[in-house]
Image: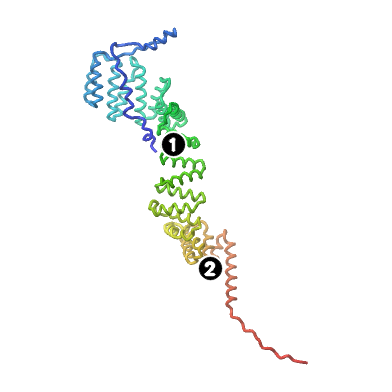
Amino acid sequence: MNIIKVLKPVSKTVFAAALLVPLMLGIESSTIGLQEAAAQEENKPRKTKRVESIRQKLIKDFEKVQEAFEAKNYTEANRILSKIEKTEGLNNIERAYVHNYRGNMCFEQDNLNCALREFKKVVVTQDGLPESFYNQMIYVIAQVYFSQEKYSDALSYAQRWFKTQADPTADAYMLVGQAQYMLKRYDAALPNVQKGIQKYIDVGSVPKEGWLNLLSYIYRQKNEYKNMLPVLKQLVQHYPKKTYLLTMAGVYNELDDQPKMTAMYQALYDQGLLTKESEIVTLAQLNMSSDNPYAASEIMRKGIEANVIKKNLKHYRIYSQSLFAAREYEKALAPLQRAAELSSDGKLYNQLGLSYVQLNRWREAENALKKAINKRGLTDTGGVYISLGLTQFEQKKFNEATATFNRATNYEKVSGDARNWIRYVQSEVRRIEELNAPIQEIDTSVEPVVKN
């Protein structure tokens, strides 16, 4: 998931504070009275800061700029700003306002490079500027850099702004955390994101969805899945969405807690919330691995019949194997036959043959096992020959069965069994021959007894 799209850190309302800095009227310079008063109170010398203000002759021009800006008449606003800029002896606060307005107009027109260029001109010098205004512009520059995905620059300006704040806002912590995340500095990002979220919680607010997402992403990157779970539970509680439940199920899988993962998938399925092919197939596979093959087969059957699950090799294999594992041999035949036809090796034909064996359908079993051998790619070819010989034996094809068992003797794993089968076939042949042998007539004549 694209974290930029999730977090959306910059919007056109971000810069409102910069525009709302009041015009300083009346005198050309003043001092920060509170700082001076505090210094006097502590009987300690403290530097006072000179703050310039807009001169009387330019106030109306700046008011007209504001009106044009609010009306989105940027051509007129620029015309007036150009006029102001030509005024002789502009002080620093007047220049700052010119660049601030131009930067905001550029931003409103989605020209971020232009906006950045103008905002940076505002902070060329701090002399004569109100401290709050200057610091706000540092923060704005950080946000513009972030929206340009220049995370290192964004972080630099954000950290510079942080040093000026006694109690940074939750949004500020998040901006720093986001930039660090994008730079893959996960250990550094974590405490900032945690702090931003906690500041929201402390005032009784629900953390923003994007913020909780970011925290969960950080834990994922650090493989801290246990810590990720509570965050996902908050997302489910405050922003209930299927995607968070599925993510939670995935976390249980990472924690080797498959029963909980299966239970979550099953609950979503029962509520009709699993609609994608991959989700439904995953549930079927989870049921298979949880020794519940019949449930898996029903899930696959319904998905295939509803055309939600594609009728391909992979899905026919899962469906047939689940039926086979559930000992639904008759039902397994059709999907297993289709899967075997689509497969590039003979493994599924072997399974099909064994299904027929379970049903005592020897001829079909023989045909399937022969196809398995011909397709090759078997994991136990000798075992397949044993099964094939059995089907031939049951059909009383003793010569063919003997020949098949002879081939099986070439495979060390089953060679002993194959020889036993050969002896058994031979003994069965003899037994049948004996049963079919003609009964010899018994001489019932009695010789006369000779008396002495």
Tell me which residue sits at (33%, 11%) in the image: 30
Q: Position of residue 319 (x, y in %)?
A: 45, 54
Identify the residue under disc 2. 394
The answer to whether marks 2 and 1 mark residues whose Cβ atoms lie closer than 8 Å is: no
Residue 1: give x, y in percent of width and height. Answer: 39, 38
Q: Amino acid at mark 1?
A: Gln
Residue 444, placed above or below residue 252: below
Provide the secondary structure element on which disc 1 rests. helix
Which residue matches tag 1? 237
Residue 399 to residue 117: above or below: below
Question: Toward the viewer: 204 or 84?
Answer: 204
Q: Quadrant of the C terminus?
A: bottom right
Q: Secondary structure at mark 2?
A: helix
Three-letter amino acid code of the residue under disc 2: Glu
Residue 37 is situated, as x and y percent measured from the top left of the image, at 40, 9
The mark found on residue 40 in the picture is none
**Location of residue 209 (image quadrant):** top left
Mark 2 is surrounded, within 10 Å at the Cα level, by few (under 14), some (14 to 19) or many (20 or more) other residues, namely some
